[in-house]
Image (cartoon, rainbow, N blue to C red):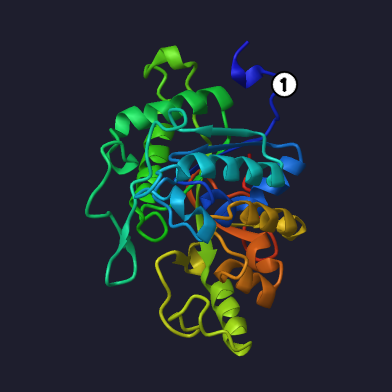
Amino acid sequence: MSASSDSSQPAQRLLLVHAHPDDETIGNGATMAKYAAEGRGVTLVTCTAGEQGEILVPELEHLAADRDDTLGEHRRGELADAMAALGVTDHRYLGGFGAYRDSGMKWHPDGHAIPADEVHENAFWRADLTEAATHLVAIIREVRPQVLVTYDEFGGYGHPDHIQAHRVATYGAALAAVPSYRRDLGPAHDVAKIYWGAMSESRMRAGLRALRDAGDTTTFEGMDPDGPLPHFVTADEDLAAMVEATDYFEAKMAAMRAHATQITTDGPFFALSNNVGAPAWGQEFYRLAKGTQGPLGPEGLETDLFAGL
C-alpha cells in the first residue's frame, strides 16, 4: 500500500522545514498546535540541533560550542518538550540527528545576519544541496504532505541556516515530484502548496506602538512603529494567509518556555504578548510561494493553509 492510500494517515498533512530548534515555535507554533489538535498531520523537519546558539541560562553556559559543546543534545530535549506542548508527535532531523551542524552567524552592520567568519566542517551552510534535499525527498514521499512551510529566500533575517533550509525545502519539493528521480525513495509526490512564514507589517507596527506607548523602549530596540522595519516584516499586500489560532496561544507560549536556553520570559516575544495579547503570536501569517490561493476570509486572506485543496 502506498503512503497516499494509507488510511492510517490524516487526510490533510502539513510539513514544516526549519533550521534550528525554537524556529518552528516562534514562527508557526500556534498553527502547528491548532492543526495537531484538529487531527491534521503535522510533521516537523529540523535541519540542525542549534549547536551554536547563544545560551540565555547562566547555569547552562558550559554547554556552549566553545566549552563543552553539548548544547545540541540539550536542545534536542528542549525541542521534544516543545513538541509535546504543541501536541506534535512527528518530528525528524534532516538526515538524522547530528547529520548537519548549526552554522552559526554574525551580524552585518546593516542589521541582518551573515555567515560567521569560521564555519564548522559539518555546518549546514556547507551542505551539498542535492544531498540535503534528497534527505527531504525521502520524507516528502513518505508523508506526502499537501502543504509545506519554510522560510523566504533571505531566511527571514539572513541567517545562513535559514537560507539553506529555504533552498533545501524548495529543491527537495521539486525533486520529490519527479517520478524518475530516486525511485528507491518511493512514488513521486508533488506538494500542492508551499508557504513562506511571514510577519504582517501592520500587526508589527501596531505591536511596536503598543510597546512604546507602554513605556517599553528596549523590546525590538531601534524599531520605530512609523519607521523602516527589518526584512522579516512583510508588507500586508504580499500576505496570502493568516491562521487564526489564538485559542492555541497558551500552547505556543508553553512551547516557547520549553526552549529555555534560547528564549527568556522577559524577552521580546513575551513582552509583545504581555502588551498586545494573544493575537500577537496566536495569529500567524504566510506568503504563498507555490499553488493557488484558496477561498479568502474576512481580512482578504486564506484562513487555512489547506484552503482550496
Compared across the picture, whether 255 is left or right of 293 comes to right
| x 66%, y 66%: residue | 299
Identity, as a three-letter code, of the amino acid under mark 1: Ser
Q: Quadrant of the C terminus?
A: top right
Q: Is residue 307 above or below residue 54?
A: above
Residue placed under numbered mark 1 in the picture: 8
Residue 173 location, quadrant: top left
| Element type where label 1 sits in the image | loop
Residue 107 location, quadrant: bottom left
Q: How many marks?
A: 1
Is residue 76 in sight in this rendering? Answer: yes
Compared across the picture, whether 36 is left or right of 136 comes to right
Q: Is residue 48 above or below residue 304?
A: above
- Residue nearest the observer in this picture, 298 or 275: 275
Compared across the picture, whether 304 is left or right of 173 comes to right
Is residue 308 in sight in this rendering? Answer: no
Q: Is residue 248 above or below residue 171?
A: below
The spot of residue 124 in percent (x, y) is 34, 40
| x 68%, y 61%: residue | 282
- Residue nearest the observer in this picture, 236 or 91: 91
The spot of residue 212 in percent (x, y) is 57, 86
